[in-house]
Amino acid sequence: MFEQVFESLRTATTTSIQMQQEMFNKWASFWPGVASFAAGGTDQVQKAKKKWVELTTDMVKKQRETLEAQFNAGLKHIEESFRLAKAKDPEELRAKTVELWQKSVECMRQMYEAQLRDFQGAVVKWTELMTKGAA
């Protein structure tokens, strides 16, 4: 059962990384507009740099918060898995195992959704910065 969970996690991670790479490549295609943006004046460039730093800092903070939540949830699930040994009979063990498995899968789903939302928000902000700056 855990092998299926790990395989699903591996597949989801691979898909997530591929999507992030595609989005980054798409976003990076906006870079040619930076030359015309930079020609607009040093004041605009300084504002863009400041905004870029703010966006990047915000993204890193959100990523740290997400990772901390993942680690905390992982520790909680590990502790719960050790409590499985206290089951009195096979039926109780099965029920607790299924419940732990469902909680783990739901937690992974929520974490991936949060990461995807954060990434989408960052791409939107970066795109706005690049298109407003290039205009």
Image (tube, rainbow, N blue to C red):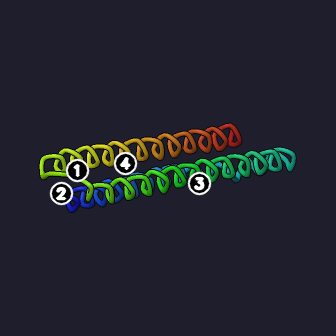
Q: Name the residue under label 3.
A: 64
Horizontal side of residue 120 vs 12, given as left or right: right
The type of residue carrying mark 1 is Thr
Q: Which of marks 3 and 1 is in front?
A: 1
Q: Mark 1 points at which residue?
A: 97
Horizontal side of residue 27 vs 110, given as left or right: right
Say whether disc 4 or disc 3 marks the residue closer to the N-terminus.
Answer: 3
Say whether disc 3 or disc 2 marks the residue closer to the N-terminus.
Answer: 2
Q: Which of marks 4 and 1 is in front?
A: 1
Tell me how far mark 2 sits from mark 4, CA to CA.
16 Å
The residue positioned 12% from the left and 52% from the top of the image is 90
| Tag 3 secondary structure | helix
Say whether disc 4 or disc 1 marks the residue closer to the N-terminus.
Answer: 1
Most foreground residue, 109 or 86: 86
Q: Position of residue 45 (x, y in %)?
A: 80, 49
The type of residue carrying mark 3 is Arg
Tell me how far mark 1 sits from mark 2, CA to CA.
10 Å
The type of residue carrying mark 4 is Met
Say whether disc 3 or disc 1 marks the residue closer to the N-terminus.
Answer: 3
Q: Nearer the viewer, mark 1 or mark 2?
A: 1
Find out whether the residues at labels 1 and 2 contact each other: C-beta distance under 8 Å. Answer: yes
- Which disc is residue 108 wearing? 4
The type of residue carrying mark 2 is Met
Q: Where is residue 29 in the image (x, y as percent from the top left)?
A: 53, 52
Say whether disc 2 or disc 4 marks the residue closer to the N-terminus.
Answer: 2
Tell me how far mark 3 sits from mark 1, CA to CA.
30 Å
